[in-house]
Image (cartoon, rainbow, N blue to C red):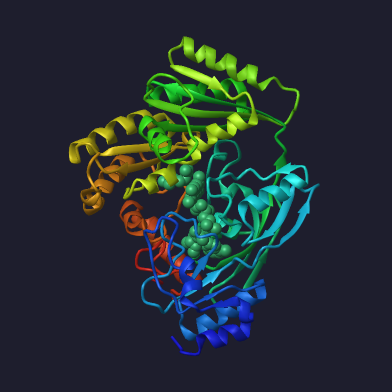
Amino acid sequence: VTADLPVRLRDLVGPAGVVTAPDQQASYLVDWRGAYRGRAAAVVRPGSTAEVAAVLRLCAAEGIAVVPQGGNTGLCGGSVPDGSGTQVVLSTDRLRAIRGVDRANRTMTVEAGVVLADAQAAARDAGLLFPLSLGSEGSATIGGNVATNAGGTAVLRYGTMRALTLGLEVVLPDGRIWPGLRGLRKDNTGYDLTGLFVGSEGTLGVVTAAVLRLFPAIRRRATAWVGLPDVAAAVALIDLLQDRVGDRLSAFELMSRESVRTVLDHVPGTRDPLPGQHAWFALVELGDTAAGEPLDDVLAATLDDALDADLVSDAVLATSPAQAAALWRLREGVSEAQNAEGPSLKHDVTVPISCLPEFVVRTGAALADALPGVRLVTYGHVGDGNLHYNLGPPRGSDGGELVARADELSAIVYDSVASFAGSISAEHGLGRAKAAAAARSLDPVELDLMRRLKAALDPAGLMNPGAVLADGQGRSG
Ligand code: FAD
Ligand code: 2HG
Ligand code: ZN
């Protein structure tokens, strides 16, 4: 790395755009969980697409690797540099403009550094809905959401970020700008480049802006907290709800008892909404665009039928927005609560919804054999088939054994996922954490195609090396 790099970057982006002081760099060099720490030659904060292009041109000319970073809430270590001190962190935190809302086209164009909650607010101000919804929405950015193909709690109704993204502006590794900000719902002019950059985790270029789909505002909601005997009952309840309310089912989140216990122990102000012991809980939400619909009645009647059919052991409906928010806090608090408990092994998996009950039973038994007492903090967006299958150490243990045996324990989870034709990364991406595991689980033809794509777009391997593809490099042959 050239010693005058910070000076040369300052020439391109101005003094406010380069961070060199160690205390000011610190937050850019560690991930949200504190699981990945690195060093950087510089942290650069371009203020425009042209400045991003200038930075990437300079880095390409000097052979300097670039790690794009948005809100730094990613859970796979993809947003922090390695320990070499030779990489540049490119933060999008100055790309914060909402470029426009096209009400009639039901789209908005926003820059990559716009925080998800601000994008949601801009849509709301226009009387519309941007439905992507994540526990991290107060910090995660649209660029990060695009780069990870983020999912969250509304996927069963609206799809993942890929389904919500109509067009992109991307700066390529050589500094060229692809101005693909089209707001079209149909566009068959060749390969789907937008779809390719969605989920590319900073390994193919820097997303600088996106055209996002907007939806009719939700004017009426009904929210319930449900106790369930097992995952088979949860799957049957999803089926029943979809038959009764169609796409008004806007969230179906499942939590094991251990997940709820973790939140109740660590998140201040939370309380158990149901008396009695239940093995599983679901947070169910319906939403309607028509304000006059008696949604609470529809939900209550469906849950009554589910009680009669023994699918549900108990249920309570939120009677105010504050009560609904308290129920959501129980669900959204799991990551924070599990962080507070110490080391954990995260798995973000998906299998067909129909296979979830058997997946949970079989994987749980195999893990209990391997590490008796292992705590299964199992929860997730099961309305779309996604489970966060997180492991905590046995009670009374400090987690040393869990961490030391991480590869072995994760292999049990991933082998089980494979046996149900599932995926080892549903919504968080691969980053550095799961690149090697993905290389083992992908078909060799798939892996070869991915390497060729990487080699075609980033032949020098300078964009986020080590993320997605374990060796960091594409391959041309
Ligand atoms: P970062 O963490 O900064 O980066 C993530 C990846 O994207 C990195 O590889 C980075 O290099 C790349 N990147 C970032 N910006 C750009 C850009 N402009 N161009 C190119 N590459 C870029 N995720 C879900 O899918 N669903 C959830 O429900 C969910 N809940 C969460 C709850 C909590 C409490 C936390 C901490 C995280 C959660 N996440 C969830 C994970 C995370 O918030 C998402 O992955 C989010 O999309 C990351 O956005 P970010 O701006 O923080 O990206
Ligand atoms: C969620 O759904 C997030 O809460 C985070 O995707 C999952 O921390 C996790 O494992
Ligand atoms: Zn999630």
Which residue is depicted at the point 64% across and 31% down?
Answer: 321
Picture quadrant of ligand 2? top left
Residue farthest to the top? 308
Which one is in front, 207 or 447? Answer: 207
Kindly identify the residue that appears in the image at 48 percent across and 67 percent down. Answer: 28
| Residue 284: x %, y % from top left | 54, 28
Residue 321 position (above or below residue 203): above
Q: Is residue 424 visible?
A: no
Where residue 86 sits, quadrant-wise, is: bottom left
Residue 99 in view: yes
In the image, 245: left or right of 254?
right
Q: Is residue 46 above or below residue 200?
A: below
Q: Residue 401, percent across and down? A: 20, 49
Horizontal and vertical percent position of residue 412: 25, 43
Q: Is residue 379 left or right of residue 46?
A: left
Considering the image in quadrants, where does the C terminus appear?
bottom left
Q: Residue at x 46, y 11 (%)?
A: 309
How many marks on residues? Answer: 0
| Residue at the image point whose x is 75% and y is 23% from the top | 292
Q: Is residue 333 above or below residue 321?
A: below
User: Which of these two is toward me, 106 or 264?
Assistant: 264
